[in-house]
Image (cartoon, rainbow, N blue to C red):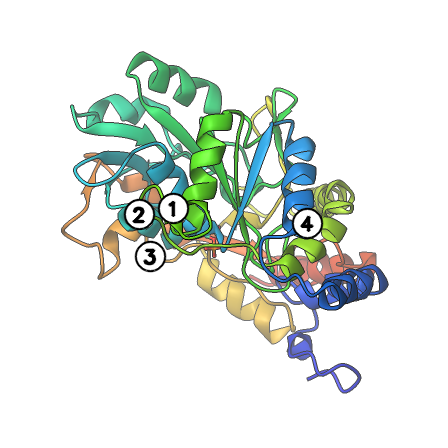
Amino acid sequence: MCRRCGSLTDQWLVPLTDPHKQFLAHRSEIDQAIRRVTDSGWYILGPEVENFEQEFADFLGVTHGVGVANGTDAIALALRTLGIGLGDEVITVAHTAVATVAAIEQAGATPVLVDVDPDYLTLDPSLLGEVLTSRTRAVVPVHLYGQAADVTTIRAFCDTHKLAMIEDVAQAHGATWNGSRLGSFGDMAAFSCYPTKNLGALGDAGMIVTNDPALAARARHLRQYGWVERNNSVEAGVNSRLDELQAAVLSVKLRYLDQGNTRRRVIASSYQAAFADTGWLLPHSREQAMEVFHLYVIQADDRQSLQESLARRGIQAAVHYPIPVHLQPAYASRIRTSASMARTEQAAKRVLSLPMFPELTDQDVTTVTSAVRAIVETR
Ligand SMILES: *Cc1c(COP(=O)(O)O)cnc(C)c1O
């Protein structure tokens, strides 16, 4: 526990992530933004939300942003906005946060999970044909760890088969593909602004974006009881609103997103250089992509002993994700998958995320690389 500020995150010499440090880095602007909201008396769906929705859409190069309560709701509401629900199948991956799959079921649809490609651990587009049925309505590529899924090939498949594409960009705010921001390729895209994400609020928050004004309008209705106006529901909706407070905080954080992502890439290249001869599979990027390293994930056969050795030296590492979704108790034996899920199951045994966030100091990075050198040399 930090005696000065009460934060619980300094039990590690170098933590995996530290949203509190990011708050401290921008504290005066954030405090000012919070004060503006508390003084305004307007707390839900007001000028701060409208302003952030437009700023975020402009940042991505799309026309519409719709603030919602969290990233899971953003995916579920995007699906519902596109008219996808009961009886419809939606294809995504098992190597992702469970939220992606939970969101598809929240919309009432049936998730179908395919394996990932071995190099980037994102949806393998060559498997889409294998699981396609007459009920398939959409594909949800996940831009995992800040690395782009192959949206060009996935989009082409969707166009051929008249499917919607909804990008899950919860881990890739600001990343690009052929020079355009991820989130601008799908019919709709969903973002999470959970505190540890590249663009993180001080609580839960999410965004849906689209270039289609009719879809944006429908998402706005659905997020608030299906209201077209107060107390007049045109269709059955939900309550999934973005707070004014969180929107105001996100407006401040958005100004520093590109800078933070650049810092993440600098840290990644220090890691890359220091780990070159470890024998691990290091993250590498598709040539069309500029990645944003939400996580820095290596693949190692000795994952567990490595994680333990790092912990003994005060360095936090974690596994994203230890159990593929199709093998978790809630989903096992009832979710359809591609015939082979071997690469997903293999990745779950080998992946390890090392400390990665913009506020890591050069000293922190050296602490990590020195520890790794010491561990590798004594194994
Ligand atoms: C964080 C995350 C989500 C869900 O976001 P919440 O805001 O926690 O609901 C969805 N997909 C992926 C890939 C995520 O990392």
Q: Which badge, 3 or 4, comes first in the chain's sequence?
A: 4
For discs 3 and 2, the disc positioned in front in the rendered view: 2
Residue 93 can be seen, yes or no: yes
Q: Which of 271 and 139 is in front in this view?
A: 139
Residue 102: % across, % down: 32, 52
Q: Residue at x 69, y 44 (%)?
A: 51
- SS assignment at label 3: loop
Residue 206: % across, % down: 53, 50
The numbered disc on residue 323 is 3
Q: Residue at x 74, y 64 (%)?
A: 34
Quadrant for the C terminus in the image: bottom right
Q: Which badge, 4 or 1, comes first in the chain's sequence?
A: 4
Q: Which badge, 2 or 1, comes first in the chain's sequence?
A: 1
Q: Which badge, 4 or 2, comes first in the chain's sequence?
A: 4
Q: Name the residue under label 1.
A: 226
Q: Which amino acid does the dot numbered 2 rest on?
A: Ala
Residue 56: % across, % down: 65, 39
